[in-house]
């Protein structure tokens, strides 16, 4: 089965003032199949947002390719326009994403006008609002963002994306700014859209509970690379990589002894040699045999495949 | 045992706005004893941050504070300005959400840490720098970081500086408003560990405010859940989280799934509707329009908090019916 959207050996480097390059994405393969929901988890600064932007064509990769339906993305603005209709972005903060002076109708119709979508505009807006759970849609047409609650605003943003009939949604922390009780409703909406429209989604988040709630697969990112990938049940209940294990152990309800890693996510301008996680690795610190320890400190790991097999990038546990 | 460290008695806060009075807190009773940790949970607009601000009278001038706020038995509501200034920092201090915005970006953090110490006469000018160094080490930062500017620190480090600042004048009570909300899971775990350690080492009282029940349950002994300006359930943290009595608490605890729980797999649970507008509360139980178990009486009966078990209480008609 070919992937709907594929990242192939993707790297993105940012040049900093000091002259050293920040390796924001340092080799990533990822396949997103039609109708699949993937959660991309990791700490801030691990490159997950850069990966989302690159998949959307908002950031040009330094090397590697993004393929949509098997074809590499165009680089011209004109060539990207059609793709940008198919892949839609949903951001964390709906208040920032909506123009405060535009009505709900304008917000949803804007994309239709930009992409010159044929058909009756009013009908398309009505349908999109109703799909996003704003019912009856006519009641919301004339409202402006400040008259809506946070959950309703996020639904307007999602409706704006849906109006263009995309095949994939890329959502960056879609519920992080919403209240607990509203969060479940928005996540349920994403699941329903997948079931009704076959919409694929890449959900970028630091919330592992969200992955458990809606995702089919989960990819764990650390310092520009995916270090573990696989079906949600497998990765979240039987994590292999010491980093994934640590992330899960610090959840308040984990029931395992918490492995609190010291320090913050390291700097992408100086990625450690060998396994990029080794300076913080609890497994290495607790003692592994000499040969494995040497490999952890000096041998870089291969980039994982992004297909449906589960995989883990670790010298000590990886097979 | 003497009087509690902090006692709120029928606390009310009303904001007077251009569109009329908005009751944000509608009668809250809460006790924090010395060395005790109490969590206050709820969604945005439920009044939990207003409670935090009201304890030290940090509210804007449009707010009217009613009821009693007893700090070591002394009523904060009736305090004169001079006394209030002495009590802030020295008896009780607040750690706010989003430390990155609370620190002055053009001054080193050490200078900012020294300010409350000098103002409250905690030390002479020559001993201040060593006190600042001690404080930083207490929160797990090297003393030399006193010379760093806020932008040179990460989010977690800045939050540690804010906690150090709250500890600067040896308060007996710390109020932490969403201390970990903007932080990553790993950094959140570090900060929560630090807070728990300091509370038990120094024997101070802690009131922690968050929307995340599981975070509160892992740090606090007791838990109070607020909805529409009132506490609707309180009790020992574990019990409230694992066997919630109020339907709202049930929904809130289900919103954060337990990983590995097959019931929540591919089944996110939320609550239909939105939290009520405090200026236009529904009649009866304010939760009834969203409540999955509401029945006819809920529409016109406003329930008060009543005991449901030892040390537990809930404000729900389902819990008081015979």
Image (cartoon, grey):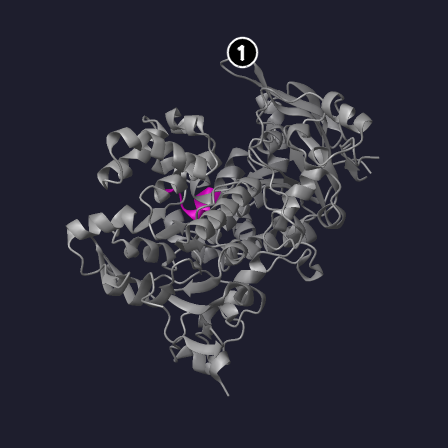
Whether residue A310 can be seen here: yes
User: Which quarter shows the N terminus of chain A?
Assistant: top right
Depicted A144 relative to depicted B115: above or below: below
Indicate whether residue A13 is drawn in magenta.
Answer: no
**Residue holding disc 1:** A19
Which quadrant of the structure image shows residue B31?
Answer: bottom left
Query: Which residue is at a point 50% across and 80% down the rendered structure image?
Result: B318
Can you name the residue that lies furthest to the top here?
A19
Task: Tell which of B180 and A148 is nearer to you.
Answer: B180
Query: Which residue is at a point 58% across and 16% down the rendered structure image?
Result: A21
Is residue A209 toward the left or the right of residue B122 in the image? right
Residue A41: horizontal and vertical position, in percent?
63, 40
The magenta span reads A100-107
Depicted A29 relative to depicted B311: above or below: above
Residue A142: horizontal and vertical position, in percent?
40, 51
Depicted B235 relative to depicted B255: above or below: below
Can you name the residue that lies furthest to the right here?
A319
Q: Secondary structure at mark 1?
A: loop
Residue A189: horizontal and vertical position, in percent?
59, 54
């Amino acid at each position: 089965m070919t992937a709907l959207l594929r990242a192939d050996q993707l790297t993105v480097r940012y040049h900093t003032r000091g002259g050293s390059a920040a390796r924001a994405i340092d080799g990533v393969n990822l396949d997103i199949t039609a109708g699949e929901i993937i959660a991309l988890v990791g700490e801030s600064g691990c490159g997950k947002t850069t990966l989302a932007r690159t998949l959307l064509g908002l950031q040009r990769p330094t090397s590697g390719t993004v393929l949509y339906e098997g074809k590499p993305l165009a680089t011209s603005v004109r060539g990207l326009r059609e793709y940008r209709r198919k892949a839609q972005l949903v951001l964390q903060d709906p208040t920032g994403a909506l123009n405060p002076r535009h009505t709900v109708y304008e917000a949803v119709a804007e994309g239709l006008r930009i992409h010159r979508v044929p058909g009756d505009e009013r009908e398309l807006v009505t349908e999109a609002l109703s799909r996003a759970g704003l019912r009856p849609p006519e009641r919301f047409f004339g409202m402006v963002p400040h008259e809506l609650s946070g959950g309703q605003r996020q639904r307007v943003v999602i409706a704006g994306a849906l109006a263009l009939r995309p095949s994939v949604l890329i959502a960056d922390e879609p519920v992080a700014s919403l209240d607990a009780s509203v969060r479940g409703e928005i996540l349920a909406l994403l699941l329903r859209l997948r079931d009704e429209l076959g919409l694929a989604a890449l959900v970028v988040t630091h919330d592992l509970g969200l992955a458990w709630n809606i995702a089919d697969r989960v990819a764990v990112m650390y310092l520009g690379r995916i270090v573990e990938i696989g079906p949600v049940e497998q990765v979240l209940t039987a994590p292999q990589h010491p980093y994934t294990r640590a992330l899960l152990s610090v959840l308040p309800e984990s029931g395992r002894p918490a492995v609190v890693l010291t320090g913050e996510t390291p700097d992408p301008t100086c990625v450690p040699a060998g396994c990029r996680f080794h300076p913080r690795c609890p497994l290495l610190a607790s003692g592994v045999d000499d040969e494995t320890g040497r490999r952890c400190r000096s041998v870089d790991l291969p980039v994982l495949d992004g297909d449906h097999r589960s995989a883990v990038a670790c010298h000590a546990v990886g097979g | 045992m003497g009087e509690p460290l902090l006692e709120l008695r029928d606390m009310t806060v009303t904001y007077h706005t251009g569109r009329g009075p908005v009751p944000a807190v509608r009668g809250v009773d809460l006790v924090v004893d010395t060395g005790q940790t109490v969590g206050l949970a709820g969604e945005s607009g439920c009044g939990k941050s207003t409670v935090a601000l009201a304890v030290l009278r940090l509210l804007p001038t449009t707010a009217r504070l009613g009821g009693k706020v007893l700090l070591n038995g002394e009523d904060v509501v009736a305090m004169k300005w001079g006394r209030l200034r002495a009590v802030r920092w020295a008896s009780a201090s607040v750690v706010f959400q989003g430390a990155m915005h609370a620190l002055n970006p053009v001054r080193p953090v050490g200078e900012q840490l020294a300010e409350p110490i000098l103002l409250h006469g905690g030390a002479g000018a020559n001993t201040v720098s060593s006190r600042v160094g001690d404080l930083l080490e207490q929160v797990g930062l090297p003393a030399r970081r006193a010379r760093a500017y806020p932008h040179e620190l990460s989010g977690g480090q800045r939050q540690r500086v804010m906690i150090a600042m709250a500890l600067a004048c040896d308060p007996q009570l710390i109020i932490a408003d969403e201390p970990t909300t903007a932080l990553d899971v790993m950094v959140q775990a570090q900060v929560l560990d630090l807070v728990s350690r300091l509370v038990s080492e120094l024997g101070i009282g802690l009131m922690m405010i968050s929307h995340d029940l599981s975070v509160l349950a892992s740090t606090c002994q007791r838990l109070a859940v607020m909805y529409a300006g009132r506490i609707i359930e309180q009790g020992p943290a574990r019990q409230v989280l694992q066997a919630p009595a109020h339907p709202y608490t049930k929904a809130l605890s289900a919103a954060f799934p337990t990983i590995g729980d097959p019931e929540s797999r591919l089944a996110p649970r939320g609550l239909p509707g939105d939290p009520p507008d405090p200026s236009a509360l529904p009649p009866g139980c304010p939760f009834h329009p969203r409540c999955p178990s509401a029945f006819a009486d809920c529409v016109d009966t406003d329930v008060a908090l009543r005991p449901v078990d030892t040390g537990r209480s809930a404000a729900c008609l389902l819990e008081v019916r015979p």
